[in-house]
Amino acid sequence: MMEKTVRRGTRTGFTTGACSAAAARAAVLGLVGGAVPEAVDCLLPNGDVVRFAVNDGRCEGSGEGGQAAHAMVIKDAGDDPDCTDKAHLTADVRVLPGRAGEVVLCGGFGVGTVTMAGLGLEVGGPAINPVPRRNIEDNVRAVGGPLLTHAGLEVTISVPQGVEMAKKTLNARLGILGGISILGTTGIVKPYSTSAYRASVVQGVQVAATLGHGVVVLTTGGRTEQFAMKERPDLPAACFVQMGDFLRYALDEAVAQGLREVVIGGMVGKLTKIAQGETITHANRAEVDTQLLAELAARVGAPPEVCAEIAAAETARFGAERMQALGLGEPFHHALAQAVVQTLTAPDRYGDRFHLTVLVCDFDGSKITEAASGPAANA
């Protein structure tokens, strides 16, 4: 019974992006071979190949395997309490005659439409994030070669339950209307919201403390970890801990283990949450304080009308992109990094119990700036 209890909190699942890519791959296989398979091996963004069961497969039309195909994959979120668990990620693929080599990605029913800037997606386009977008296309091209030599392929992703599921998300507040987002940077869902993941973060800090380097590097996810590893190539991989949203638990454990140096690697959204004093940074726990960002923007010379726009925005990314466009991206992010340092090293937080460095990267994982606290007090 104990074994089952342990497993219940740690089972990984698959993202909406991975399931969409699998459905698209299965539909294209149907176009090429004349029948949609009952299972498909799909390449995930992290390089893994995973087999997905395929539902509702069918081909329509005439010609080589038909001119259109339909496939659906049911999302299994593992042990993550995700409102998109059991969503039907559906792909409809049709041949585009005379458009050799083109892959066109569209959003259908239940996939949100982007209506506001600040998300890194085209306004008016579907809420399909860049990594899943590439992953869907990679899978389509991997099996669609025989068709793409003389035609294009249009892939429409839809989610029948997406409109209802979106009501349980912050999508509408972020200007994503009419459905859910297609997300996922690795293809795998880790149970970030569970006590098991929190425990794994604490364990990761404990491991880092055994290595003799006296440092732990905390990141919010895979992309920021890769960035931080490039910045600190002197450190072994076990010094790096993906803390997810559990900053407080990670820092408390760093203090408990006597670590004298802490490095935090992050992007504008999570860093804003930390600067405003949040130590559990999950999207559902607190809103981003865009007023704080507006104040930082004013401090580095942004005109009042831009500061007002940033304060009124729903995302931190909007402010970052607006400042970048003004040529103030680096000083803006530096002021944010300094605010993170000041918040965490305040006397009523962690004071001088460790030396803190904050590394800031952009959405492509490229370094923007860094800030650091004064030297740590002697142990």
Image (tube, rainbow, N blue to C red):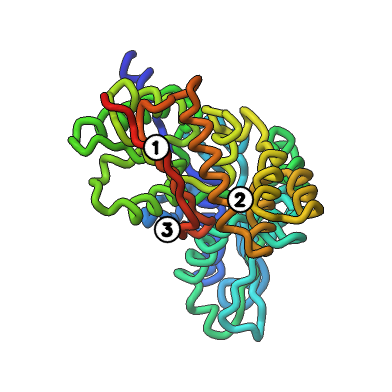
Q: List the residue tagged with mark 3.
A: 43
Mark number displayed over residue 374:
1
Q: Position of residue 66 (x, y in %)?
A: 61, 72
Left or right relative to 173: residue 320: left
Q: Which quadrant holds the C terminus?
A: top left
**Residue type indicated by callout 2:** Ile
Q: Secondary structure at mark 3?
A: strand
Nearest to viewer (mark 3 / mark 1): 1
Residue lying at 63% horizontally and 60% vertically, measured from the top left = 328
Nearest to viewer (mark 2 / mark 1): 1
Q: Position of residue 303 (x, y in %)?
A: 76, 56
Residue 35 visible in the picture: no
Q: List the residue tagged with mark 2.
A: 182
Q: Which quadrant holds the N terminus?
A: top left
Q: Earlier in the sequence, mark 3 or mark 2?
A: 3
Q: Earlier in the sequence, mark 3 or mark 1?
A: 3
State the image quarter where residue 75 is shown.
top right
Residue lying at 26% horizontally and 40% vertically, measured from the top left = 238
Nearest to viewer (mark 3 / mark 2): 2
**Residue type indicated by callout 3:** Leu
Residues at marks 3 and 1 touching, judged by CB atoms closer than 8 Å: no
Few, some or many residues within 10 Å of mark 3 (<14, 14–19, 20+): many
Q: Position of residue 25 (x, y in %)?
A: 51, 61
Q: Nearer the viewer, residue 205 or 277?
A: 277
Residue lying at 60% horizontally and 49% vertically, measured from the top left = 89
Few, some or many residues within 10 Å of mark 1 (<14, 14–19, 20+): few
Vertical order, 8 against 180 (above or below): above
Q: Earlier in the sequence, mark 2 or mark 1?
A: 2
Residue 325 visible in the picture: yes
Vertical order, 249 against 239 (above or below): above
Q: For the residues marked 2 and 1, what is the alpha-carbon distance in whole angstroms?
A: 42 Å
